[in-house]
Every structure is written in C-alpha cells, then in structure tokens.
Amino acid sequence: MAVVNQRTPLVLLATATAVAVSACNSDPAPFDTSAFADEIADTLDDELSDDEFSAEVRCPIDDWEEIVEASMQELDDDVVRDALRTDTNESAFATDAGSYLDCSFFDDEIQLGAGVFLLEAPRDPEDYAEEFAGEGARVDVEETDAYRGGQFRHVCVEYDDGEPYCQVEWSDENVLIGVYVVGEDADRIDTDVLEDGFRPRLDLVMAQFEA
C-alpha cells in the first residue's frame, strides 16, 4: 500500500495562503509625480505671468468633474449635494501662501462649492494650510494614512466671519492635490469617508500623468 503524506497538502495550502496574504498586504508602488508637477508648474506659469487670478485655465486633470463627484458620492450631506449643483470653474490663483490651480463647482455669491485643487508641493504642508487659511482662522490638520509615496491629511478651517471648509489632501515631495467642500456647515462633513472616496480617484488622476 502506498503511504500518503498527509502533511504535504497542508504545507502547500499554508504556503499558498502566505503568498496570497503577502500579495494583499504589499504596498503599491509610489506614484511618479514628476510629470504631474511639471504640468502644474507650466500651467501656473502660463496663466499667472502677469496676474494674480485667471479664470481662463484648462484644468490639467481630465474629467475632473467626475473625479470630484465620485470622491464625494458617499457623503450624505446637503452641503455637498448643493455644492455639486453649482457652476463649474477652472481657475488659477496666486496667493501669499503660493500659487495653485482650482477646478471646482462653485457659487461665488453664497460661497458654496466643492472641487479639486493642485499645486507644487510646499516645503511644509501643515504650515501651508495655516498660511493659506489666513490670519484669525482656526485650522485643524490631521495626518492620516501614508499612501504610495505620499501622505494623506485632513484639513478643516473655520472663521468667525466667513464660510468654513474641509478638505482631504495628499502630497509627496513634488505635488499636493486635494478635494474640498466649502460653505455653511462644510466643517461637519466626514473627512474619513471623503478620504475613502478620494483614494481610488487619486490613482486615476496619477495614471493620467505617469508614463
């Protein structure tokens, strides 16, 4: 009678399981953001050579409206739904904190909007968030997950006189990109849910600029 090694299938199963778990737990490769950073810099240089504001910008991100809407689809909040019904804008701004591109749904009259913003990475993103918010603002910055060579952060800003905003942003050594909501009660949105929605859309954005 042949002797069957009963341990062999278990060993093979354990090995296969370990490989599968290792594959699931392995971190995806860091983004190559160099071309994206160049695109941002070139657009800002072209649009802001003589001005502090331009509303004639072509947003470097293809289908940015779908990126914003999909990032926010799980946010069960009236301020988000109302913001996504406003007019679209593609703009460039020069501020004391630095220049940036803004692709958004926005109603200037009532200061309500939602969008995606992008800029070359500041030296210190937390300092940038505070400088951008301006004097007298109450700024809360929370680092969350490291992801693909960069870092997610949640930023919420409140004013005594002005509409609050909250955003989820990601940055590495080259770029900073984030999605935000601004308007009355925008500071109540669930930024954990927003990060979960933005993460897969960040992959889609970066794929547009990676070789």
Image: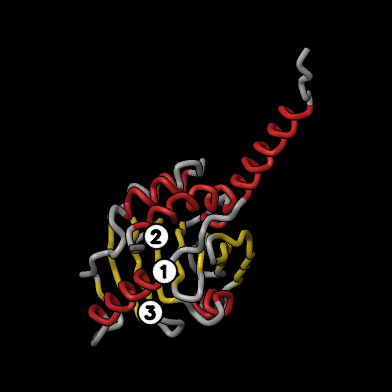
> Distance from label 3 to label 1 (Cα)?
18 Å
* Residue located 74% across and 29% down the image: 8
Checking the image for residue 99, the label placed there is 3
Specify whether residue 23 is in view: yes
Task: Report the mark closest to the observer, 2 or 3.
Answer: 2
> Distance from label 2 to label 3 (Cα)?
20 Å
**Amino acid type for the residue under numbered disc 1:** Thr
Q: Picture coordinates of residue 165 (x, y %)? A: 50, 62
Q: Quadrant of residue 96?
A: bottom left
Q: Earlier in the sequence, mark 3 or mark 1?
A: 1
* Residue located 52% across and 78% down the image: 128
Read off the residue under disc 1: 33
**Amino acid type for the residue under numbered disc 3:** Ser
* Residue located 28% across and 61% down the image: 89
Which residue is farthest left? 56
Quadrant for the N terminus, please.
top right
**Amino acid type for the residue under numbered disc 2:** Met
What secondary structure is marked by label 3? strand
Q: Quadrant of residue 149?
A: bottom right
Which residue is farthest top? 1
* Residue located 67% across and 37% down the image: 17
Instruction: Report if the CB atoms under discs 2 and 1 are less than 8 Å apart.
Output: yes
| Mark 1 crowdedness (10 Å alpha carbons): few <14, some 14-19, many ≥20 | many
Q: Earlier in the sequence, mark 2 or mark 3?
A: 3
Residue 210's place in the image compared with 189, above or below, is below
Q: Picture coordinates of residue 182 (x, y %)? A: 46, 59
Quadrant for the C terminus, please.
bottom left
Q: Picture coordinates of residue 115 (x, y %)? A: 39, 58
Read off the residue under disc 2: 206
Q: Nearer the viewer, residue 210 or 204?
A: 210
Which residue is farthest front? 1
